[in-house]
Amino acid sequence: MNRSDKLYNEDLAPTPKEQKNWGWFEIFNVWANDVQSLFGYTLAASLFLYSGLNGWAVFAALILAGFFIMWLVNLSGRPIVQHGIPYPVFARVSMGVFGANFPAMARGLVAMFWYGAQTYFASTAVALLILGVTGIEGSPMLLGMSGVMWISFIFVSLFQVYLFWKGIDLIKRFLNFAGPAVYAVMIILMLIIWYKAGSGLLSEVGSIFSGGTRSWEFEGLSTFGAFVAVFSIMVGYFAAVVINFGDFARFVENEEQMKKGNLWGLVGNIVFFSFITLMITGGTVAIFGETLVNPTDMVVKVDNLALTVIAAFAFFSATIGINMVANFIPPAYDLANLVPSKINFRIGGLITAGFGFVIGALWVSVITQMGIFPFVNTLGAILAPVFGIMIADYYIIKKQELVVDELFDDSPSSRYHYNGGFNIKAILAWVLSGYIAVGTVWPSILVFGLDDFFANLGGGGGYAWIIGASLGAVIHLIISKTLVSDHK
């Protein structure tokens, strides 16, 4: 085998058998920490408030999304568990040994956007602590954020760089503390609000949201259409993790352990966390008559200093822990892998931190004006076609055949070399399907009548992930002429 230094290093190499020691509980913890971020709560609460659906209908859509995401990661995780390779290497199967850099960097860029968003939300927990202890809230001074928020935001940004610099072991310890802490605070907050709202909240919580004001993403949709849009938006939220799930699955002992971890960790946590979100959001509307989507705002409303301090530390820890693992480390590796001679892991991390700082600083003044749903849908639309292409290529075109050694071979004889290391067919399928998927969120960029079609569809952006992944798979199969087995 011609193992190329351009394609191989210890981070990208197949996981040795002795290091494949993860069981279902490790996968459970990955999902537990990924589900319960402040942004995840805000997204779920927004879906309850602005879809115009009965609360229990939204709850059902979120659970259905959990099962669907589980199916997706089971599909992408199977070859990863078997061969122990990370996401950028698996992408070489469909994109080519060098073409895989495009989807790897796309995932990295999306993670940087998420990193900035989560950094902002983590800073709201620090601002909550400052408010609770000093009573100082401040007023907007720059880019829509107050002096307290800027202090909090800069502190969180620097603290995350410190954690990253200290290494993954400290981050893991941080996560092990954060997961249980957040659930404890959320359960306490739910019980307090439930007590204040009265025992009838459980029977009334569904109808509290029915007939409410819909955001523009849901205007013109039927009840079923809005249900599908809620489902797809939630899937889009997990798009980045669905794509690079192999970075975790490569350490799992076997497929059975992976599936068990996905069931209890992903679906179980979505069910539990969505129920808490439903009760807190509905109770807040019933008690205060306000539509609050950030749990830090709800803690302020409860006005209990002890809860404020505990909640601030818990929200801060959880959001930073999730951010480091899901949104900071992957792009740092992607950047380092892109130009290994000039960018090492730490430099890649600093680039990520700098990019994320800009995104977080613009969150209030720019991104929230765009809307939380378009933000989630746009990032999901970019990655969705990659998933469809990789899965269709592996299961249908390659028929689950994968030669690991040739994934690190850049010679023309390698089966994954294609044309100069690039599978032009797969890249073209990604460009075409990605263009349409992003266009469902922003129809004005489309031509040939597609702009009118999606503009008139109503809520087209809510279907971005489903449309993107489906088109990616179908266009790749058509271009590759799989019906006549033209893949050899």
Image (spheres, rainbow, N blue to C red):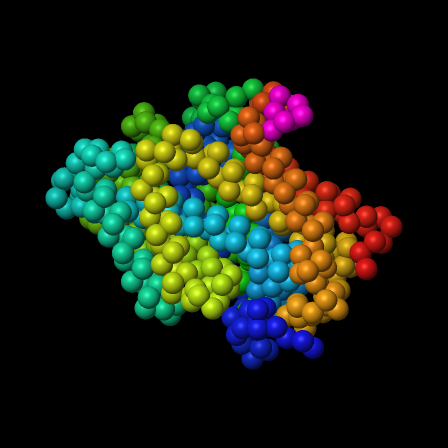
- Say if 378 sits above or below 214 in the image: below
Extent of the magenta region? 446-452
Q: Specify whether 243 is left or right of 163.
A: right
**Residue 216 rendering spot, x and y as whole percentages:** 48, 23
**Residue 36 rendering spot, x and y as whole percentages:** 41, 49
Name the residue at 35% across, 38% down. Answer: 363
**Residue 220 rendering spot, x and y as whole percentages:** 56, 19
Name the residue at 52% across, 37% down. Answer: 377
- Say if 54 sits above or below 24 in the image: above
- Does the magenta run of residues contain 451? yes
Q: Tell me if residue 423 can be seen.
A: yes
Name the residue at 66% across, 68% down. Answer: 410
- The quarter of the rendered structure image containing the C terminus is bottom right
State the residue lying farthest toward the left. 134
**Residue 100 rendering spot, x and y as whole percentages:** 61, 57
Q: Specify whether 139 is left or right of 289.
A: left
Q: Specify whether 79 is left or right of 318.
A: right
